[in-house]
Image (cartoon, helix red, strand yellow):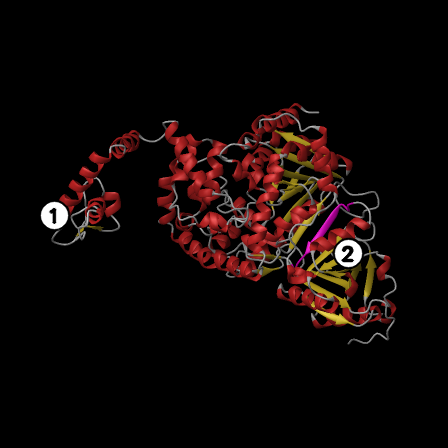
Amino acid sequence: MSEAREEILASIRRSLNRSRLDAARETELRERVAVHRRNLVPERAAALDDPGRVDLFVAMAEEVQATVARVSSPTAVPEAVARYLAAENLPADLVLAPDPSLDDLRWDARPLLRIRRGRAEAIDAVSLTPCFAAIAETGTLMLISGAVTPTTLNFLPDTHIVVVNANQVVATYEDGWDRLRTGGGMPRAINFITGPSRTGDIEQRIELGAHGPRRLHIILVDDPQKAGDGEDK
Amino acid sequence: MLATSGTFEANARAGLANDNLQRALALMRSGFPQRRRLAVERLPEFEALREIGKSIKDHTLEHLDFYLELFEENVLASGGQVHWARTPEEACGAVLAICRSVDARLVTKGKSMIAEEVGLNEYLEKNGITTVETDLGEYIIQLRHEPPSHLIAPAIHLMKEQVADTFRAEHRTLDPERSLAEARQLCDEARAVLRPRFLAADVGITGANFLVAETGSSIIVTNEGNGDLTQTLPRVHIVMTSLEKLVPTLEDATTLLRLLARSATGQEFSSYTTVSTGPRQPDDLDGPEQYHVVLLDNGRSALLASEFQDMLRCIRCSACMNHCPVYAAVGGHAYGWVYSGPMGAVLTPSLIGIAEAGHLPNASTFCGQCENVCPVKIPLPKMMRHWREREFADKLNPPVYRSGLSLWAWVARRPALYHALVELASRALGWLGRGRGRFRTLPFANGWTAVRDLPAPEGRSFHSLWAERRKGGTGK
């Protein structure tokens, strides 16, 4: 290993007035890391029941200028997407995450939506992705990178639409970590997204759409198991 | 970057006389502190979280060698690389070597105070590599060739008309008649100008708010999304960071994240918090092919277990400067280097030396607000006192100041003489000021009386009144 590395570690130990920790102490510390002990978790979201948690997520997301549409079942998603794009006067061209969870949505029911699957390119104006989890505490989406969920979809297009199933809404970030750890290793990127891109760098005035999406639209599916008739609540 | 901390007094005078700066600082005073207060009031656990945040950082610092090795082990396991750098030169050299290895011509940068600390942009430019800052505030000051004046709002010293002038001067291919009157238009223009740069960059450099030993991850917190475009689009992602950003676990990082945005901007959570672990994985459709962490020491390891160790807890939220009456009066540039406000007054002397930065720990009213709002309870005023002591011990103060202090100390150690002199002085001043009851000017105290009157003493010292009262007198 490098000379700089050895010298920095030696300098740290010199300051702390000790040599390298003994094996027993190192094992203790490794165990401290391995148990993923939670520190104090705020009660705000932790104390809520399922519907309360979803409501808090929606309220907190709207507070930071995300927009939320609630639909009863997955089949209603394409309709909600089309309606949102029309209302915002946006083109009906979408790039969709190649995630199989989006395959079952009946896109053929909205033939005017032009859909491409894959990562985002510079020309893409609207993306649609699933999420890994949604954090009620602060209205935060938790997205992870992977073969079917490329990160560029979250940042390049002007408009980012995210489908959230109600059973993906967890109370706290810690719940998100727990879900992640049951799923295997760390993805390259975990994106916690709380509202659209913004900046306050000019006279501290908040302007949306600094470099990332100008609009963040969340379609919340209240009953993800229901194969409904496509009608909104 | 060349420090001008040695001329703090002149810098501060220039700041006080700068109308644009004073207007910009007035916006800051009415903004950040109130937003922080509201966010803190909404989270009943905030005070308890401060104590836990402090203990997480203290625990990590006490076992820093262990956690650094664990961090490195996990970065390597995820396919990334760690470059240890003792000095700014080594850090710059490591970045240049990585850039050269991929023939990089264009580098995009997210916000990194470590990059500012080591003077990375200048260094890369000197070596033929174009670097483009992508955080809006950093981009503005890069165009103006200025250092940042604030930790999280680097262009906070500017009004929008100044930004418009800068954009007009620098974006020469755009229509000179275009309107740039509104912040919205300035943001849109920066977005349009920078987007092709994001897409064309060979290397993306970001900082890190936290490093996680458990997973070998780096975490950045932004609102603009520039950091994410910077680290996702190019072939290579370099994280510029320093030893003390480390925490043991994701849970520990989470606790500090709950403190960070609330303390900084008063947000519940910043728009984007991103955890990066290694390069693109085999099936990933995007992301960098290489992931490098440049770990800077630059004197930090020597601060451990010293009277300045507490400073290594700092999470760079900027609450201390947002609440500082001195910062709010003179602005960040007066501090003359990368870090400003109370955290800069403590950190700068340890990085560039107390001989150069001696003014900074003296530029304080000791009101204590910085310590009160610090999310990890850093005793900033106490450490400024430590620097003053060290400055005196190193004989760095001017001779008049030193002999004045020595004289005062000599008198103060002789109570009888001290009381006699005080009694004499208060009687004399009381007699001299008996007409108006105050002094407009006083010899040797012009600096003090220039902006206020000195009330004339009543003619007796507190000590003598107290002594009389204890003897049974009325004290009148």
Say the numbered circle drawn on residue A55: none
Asked if the stretch drawn in magenta spans residue B280, the answer is no
Residue closest to the far front: B472
Q: Which residue is mark 2?
A: A132
- x and y percent of residue B83 in the render? 67, 31
Q: Is residue A136 left or right of residue A77?
A: left
Viewer can see residue B30: yes
Q: Which residue is mark 1?
A: B431
Span of residues in magenta:
A186-196
Label 1: how many residues lie within 10 Å, few (<14), some (14-19) or many (20+)? some
Give B176 or B323, whichever is nearer the viewer.
B323
Label 2: how many residues lie within 10 Å, few (<14), some (14-19) or many (20+)? many
| Residue sitting at x 64%, y 43% | B210
SS state under label 1: helix
* Location of residue B208 by image quarter: top right
> Which kind of residue does numbered mark 2 sit on?
Phe
Viewer can see residue B178: no
* Location of residue B80 by image quarter: top right
